[in-house]
């Protein structure tokens, strides 16, 4: 479905155009990456706050003029922006197809559980640490990253902001990460946990 700046839907339409939905998500992500409010983006682009909000929520189909203004602000061509939303995210990834990465030196195995897509803000990961494994990260990939750590098996200690959090199976810790973190398997068996990551 295509909609104009007024937001009026074509007769007989049942929902927003999937491309508009993906484009809106990408526009919202680009703004969030820069830490801008809708008001700040409105000042930078010359587009009203309400129009920007409706475009991010796919309530309107952005015009070429609107996209051109936003592309100028975000420093990319329109073709680059559209290529980033060309394909819909995969809805399902089978266990056998999930990417597994192993750091043998530290005893860490990471499984990417979520179907991959650059435009999505949330991701689900499975982590496994062998007994005694100790991994330290000096900074988050994105400041303010939200993490939910749910221990499935074993014992895990997570340190953030100079506070150590001992976790047993079934415990869940929520963090917003700004600085160093540390994950340590403190029990006699592997620590297996689900990590939900949400971009700010």
Image: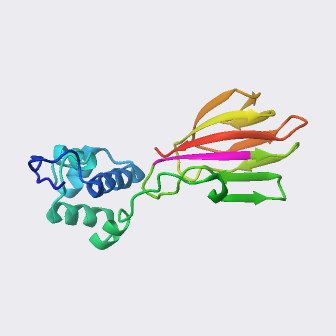
- Say whether residue 28 is visible: yes
Residue at the front extreme of this rendering: 12
Rendered residue at 32%/55% (across/down): 27
| Quarter placement of the N terminus | bottom left
Residue at 39 percent across and 59 percent down: it is: 88
Residue in front for this viewpoint, 52 or 136: 52
Number of marks present in the image shown: 0
Principal SS element in the magenta part? strand
Picture coordinates of residue 196, whole percent (x, y): 58, 41
Colour scheme: rainbow
Q: What is the quadrant of residue 99 in the picture?
A: bottom right
| Magenta span includes 123 | yes
Who's the residue at 35% across and 55% down the image? 26
Q: Is residue 76 above or below residue 63?
A: below
Is any part of residue 75 visible from this angle? no
User: Quick check: 200 left or right of 38?
Assistant: right
Magenta span of residues: 121-127
Q: Is residue 171 above or below residue 71?
A: above
Image vertical order of residue 96 relative to residue 129, above or below: below
Residue at 72% in and 34% down: 152
Answer with left or right where residue 164 lies relative to residue 35. Answer: right
Residue 97, by quadrant, is bottom right
Q: Is residue 103 left or right of residue 66?
A: right
Q: Position of residue 153 (x, y in %)?
A: 77, 34
How far across and down, in percent of the image, does residue 68 sit? 21, 66
Q: Whole-percent x and y of residue 135?
A: 77, 48
Question: Is 12 within the magenta?
Answer: no
């Amino acid at each position: 479905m295509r909609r104009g700046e007024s937001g009026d839907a074509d007769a007989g339409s049942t929902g927003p155009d999937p491309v508009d939905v993906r484009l809106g998500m990408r526009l919202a992500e680009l703004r969030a990456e820069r830490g801008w409010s809708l008001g700040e983006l409105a000042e930078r682009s010359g587009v009203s706050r309400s129009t920007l909000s409706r475009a991010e929520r796919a309530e309107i189909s952005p015009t070429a003029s609107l996209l051109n203004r936003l592309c100028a602000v975000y420093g990319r061509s329109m073709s680059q922006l559209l290529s980033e939303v060309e394909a819909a995210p995969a809805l399902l990834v089978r266990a056998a197809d999930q990417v597994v990465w192993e750091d043998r030196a530290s005893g860490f195995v990471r499984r990417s559980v979520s179907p991959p897509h650059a435009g999505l803000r949330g991701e689900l990961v499975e982590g496994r640490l062998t007994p005694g494994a100790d991994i330290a990260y000096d900074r988050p990939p994105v400041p303010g990253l939200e993490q939910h750590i749910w221990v499935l098996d074993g014992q895990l200690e997570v340190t953030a902001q100079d506070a150590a959090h001992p976790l047993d199976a079934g415990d869940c810790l929520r963090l917003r990460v700004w600085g160093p973190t540390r994950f340590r398997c403190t029990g006699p068996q592997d620590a297996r946990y689900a990590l939900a990551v949400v971009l700010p």
